[in-house]
Image (cartoon, helix red, strand yellow):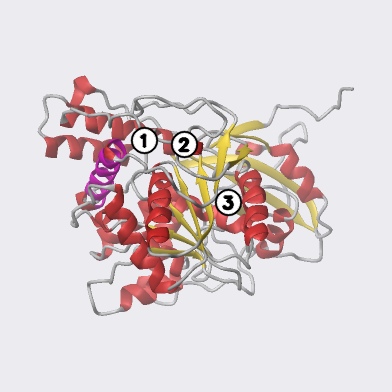
Amino acid sequence: NIEFLGRIDNQVKIRGFRIETGEIEGVLAQHPKLREAVVIVREDIPEDKRLVAYLVPNQEKTTIKDLRSFLKTKLPQYMIPAAFVFLESMPLTANGKVNRRALPIPEATSLVHQISFIAPRDSLELQLAQIWSEILAVSPIGVRDNFFDLGGHSLTAVRLMAQIEKEFGKNLSLAHLFQGPTVEELGILLHQKTDTYSWSPLVAIQPQGNRPPFFCMPGSGGNVVYFHQLARHLGNDQPFYALQPPSLDGVSEPFGRVEEIAAYYLKAIQSLQPSGPYFLGGHSFGVLVAFEMAQQLQQQGETVALLALFDLPALIPSSAPKQLDWDDTRWLTNIAHILEMLSGKNLDISSEAIKPLTPEEQLNYLKQQMETVNLLPPNSGIERLRGIVQTIKADELAFMSYVPRGGYIGSITLFRTSKVYQDELDLFSKIPTDSTWGWNQCSSQPVAVEVVSGTHTTMLAEPYVQVLAGKLKFCLARVC
């Protein structure tokens, strides 16, 4: 049978997702307080596409909060508009159709201000709100609006922290954004007199709930923000913590071995949860860190109830570690490639262009390219980027030198995509081809395999993360 789904005239692509704006309009049309709805994509900031909904309400008014809640019950997160604009009527063409080109840029109007909206109350909050508005292409920004609810994601979070450092001279970690994802809460932090903040590797992405906490290790580079959607789909009763390395500050030396990272993270999680059973997970490079943490916990006599490995083959213990003899040019071009994969943007960096430059000049060139595509704010400090680069480099070198010990006596659950792992940076000497991707050689117990949707980089993003979250939630419930 063939099901008619409608025309694809208004199909768009945002951050890798194909979106039919007519589908969003159809859902909005079901809202009893709306008379008319039009959804378009705006690119008011170059290379930063955003969904904007234009709405004509009935006599009975509704609110943006109500509309977002309504859409969240019917659409995935990536299809929820970043901005909502209320109009008295839609602009029309001479033929009587909606004139989409005449729809206004989202801005502060009296119709957008609602009871729950609190405008900035001092110069610092105003400055923060202006930064948010520029980065998210949403206006107005209330002091209690949540950064992630407004469409913020891992790379916009990095840009936000860099812009705050540039304008206020304070280097906040991404953990502060999770602890206080509003203008009001960040303003309180910045109002504090001290210029130094205690660095914690523990990032409370979702600290609420009575269940045992799930601790998750990030991929190469240590940016934990991309776990936000997974934590959200696991629910408000499942505490979710991620771990980040101190080298992201651009000053601290990065760890050189997986064993060192694992010991550092264990000390952090045991400050929150002194004894087991522990629930651990990791994605990409974080898989190796999580596995080593589980090994060290068992050596301490602790119990690991769940070890969830997200999409990385095992480094076979019998194979010799692969050696890298890359120069600075190749390192930077490969790191740029990783950033391109994560962001979906072209940094236009080639070996030929940067080879004549000194290492410091190469780093500045990368910064300029990232500023050009809005991955960093203009004239941002070099320390934050230095932290990202040195952490990725150290993680890749640690990856190459780590050989998992066999004989792990706990259970392992591998969450893997259906596609063969793509070793784009040529880090593996050999990629196992069995269904467990070689992890059966590292454990004395059978390895459970869960096949999830998406690719290595999209499995934690909408809409694919919903499949991963569902399977992980089942595993957590089974062993709790």
Please tell me whether residue 123 belongs to the stretch shown in magenta: no
- Which of the pair 334/305 is nearer the observer? 305
State the separation of the CA atoms marked 1 and 3.
47 Å
Q: Residue at x 31, y 59 (%)?
A: 263
Q: Quadrant of the N terminus?
A: top right
State the separation of the CA atoms marked 1 and 2.
8 Å
Q: Residue at x 19, y 40 (%)?
A: 364
Q: Which residue is mark 3?
A: 82
- Which of the pair 369/34 is nearer the observer? 369
Q: Which residue is mark 2?
A: 441
Residues shaded magenta: 384-400
Q: Which residue is mark 1?
A: 317
- Disc 2 residue type (three-letter): Gln
Q: Are the two marked residues, 1 and 2, in contact with CB atoms closer than 8 angstroms?
A: yes
Q: Around disc 1, counting alpha carbons within 10 Å, would you say few (fewer than 14), some (14 to 19), or many (20 or more)?
A: some
Disc 3, SS? loop
State the separation of the CA atoms marked 2 and 3.
46 Å
